[in-house]
Image (tube, grey):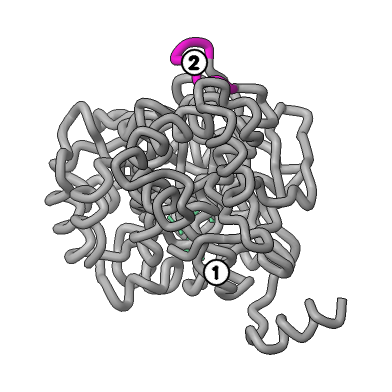
Amino acid sequence: MTLVSDQSRVNIAGLSRAELERAFVDRGVAAPEKARMRARQAWRWIHHYGAVDFAAMTDIAKETRQAMAEAFSIQRPQIAEAQESADGVIKWLIRFAPGVEAETVFIPDVARSGALCVSSQVGCTLNCPFCHTGTQGLVRNLSAAEIVAQVQTARDALGEWPTSLENRRLSNIVFMGMGEPLYNLDNVAAALDVISDNEGIAISRRRITVSTSGVVPQIRALGERTGAMLAVSLHAATDELRDRLVPINRRYPLAELMAAIRAYPGLSNARRVTFEYVMLKGVNDSPADAKALLRLIAGVPAKINLIPFNPWPGAPFECSSSAAIEAFAAILKRAGYASPIRKPRGQEILAACGQLRSESEKVRASVRRKAIAAA
Ligand code: SAH
Ligand code: SF4
């Protein structure tokens, strides 16, 4: 990972423990034999207390703090915009660099307490036709530090430092924002190591869910490297329909996808896969579709989230009627599956599933550099 620097100072806000230790040595702030201890102390301050100022690190000798402040910074990315909807959903548009913006959404009163929906990429290379993010194209992957920064930003805003294991509002994390996490697995895995660390933000891996559109070759690696819960955006039970709705299906068809899901490390009744199924009027919402879905997933420990389609400007689909969604859910329920209908949250601020999109466009690095220089 590249270390983001402010002038010559290294931003250490999102580094892994090993990177932090190395930074202490590389910058001559601690002797190699002391680096581990110093990194551990700094880690607690950054990730448990949410410190952004070295002066606060009172158990570290003053001279060392001084040396740290000269070599390092603890920076948050800029919040370009923050919006709160009437139902308490908060959406942040976070500017990681000029022209590189992604959205992060806090949804209260879900899961154990509240979930933060984080982005893994700015835009997406895939183009599922019902998804607003898919219309944007990929600008770039987010680094591990940039993914961690989304959680830190939310904790800042919610006032949830230092980490407390009780009464947290932010209890769960879902990688269901912009982008396809399994096309950025190295950074997602590194971010998970930081976020789940017990001496820091301490959100357990079982409370972190990673959603994929079906990047089959990376599914096992996700489980092995992160221990995260798996969610799969299924949306259709036949290849014919899924080829249209989730075009990555043409590359990794349902038989391969289902085999990878069945082999997901740790899958059990206590650790079920979540299937996401967007309800599109007249497209995938008939009782026959529900029965095809049951046949497809037979024997897989699963729950099914039915997501009423969230509209966005120019979207070529409509949401199924409540009656159709309820009939669909009833068929799944009768077969023994938990199949909650996800209540649309934060729709009026375009913060609901599939509505995220930033104005960031991919521009050639040379063009961007020129624009920055001109500004
Ligand atoms: N790229 C990953 C992670 C994004 S998760 C994935 O596709 O799984 C975002 C979830 O919202 C996915 O299940 C996606 O299919 C769903 N979604 C996208 N557009 C939507 C829309 N307009 N209405 C409801 N759900 C949508
Ligand atoms: Fe990308 Fe997921 Fe949207 Fe498809 S649904 S375009 S994979 S973010």
Disc 1 marks which residue? 129
Which residue is located at x 43 percent, y 30 percent? 41
Q: Main secondary structure of the magenta part?
A: loop
SS of the residue under disc 2: loop
Label 1: few (<14), some (14–19) or many (≥20) C-alpha neighbours in 10 Å: some
Q: Is residue 241 visible?
A: yes
Q: Position of residue 78 (x, y in %)?
A: 73, 51
Residue 50, placed above or below residue 128: above
Q: Nearer the viewer, residue 207 or 77?
A: 77
Disc on res. 164: 2
Residue 220, placed above or below residue 291: below
**53 left or right of 279 in image:** right
For badge 1, the amino acid type reads: Pro
Quick check: marks 2 and 1 in contact, CB under 8 Å?
no
Q: Which quadrant would the C terminus be assigned to in this image?
A: bottom right
Q: Position of residue 154 (x, y in %)?
A: 62, 35
**375 left or right of 7 in image:** right
In the rendered structure, does residue 120 fall within the stretch colored magenta?
no
Q: Quadrant of residue 301?
A: top left
Gap between marks 2 and 1 measured at Cα: 41 Å
Q: Position of residue 296 (x, y in %)?
A: 22, 53
Q: Nearer the viewer, mark 2 or mark 1?
A: 2
Identify the magenta region.
161-167
Q: Is residue 279 visible?
A: no
Q: Which quadrant would the N terminus be assigned to in this image?
A: bottom left
For badge 2, the amino acid type reads: Ser
Which residue is located at x 25 percent, y 70 percent? 253
Which residue is located at x 70 percent, y 36 percent? 90
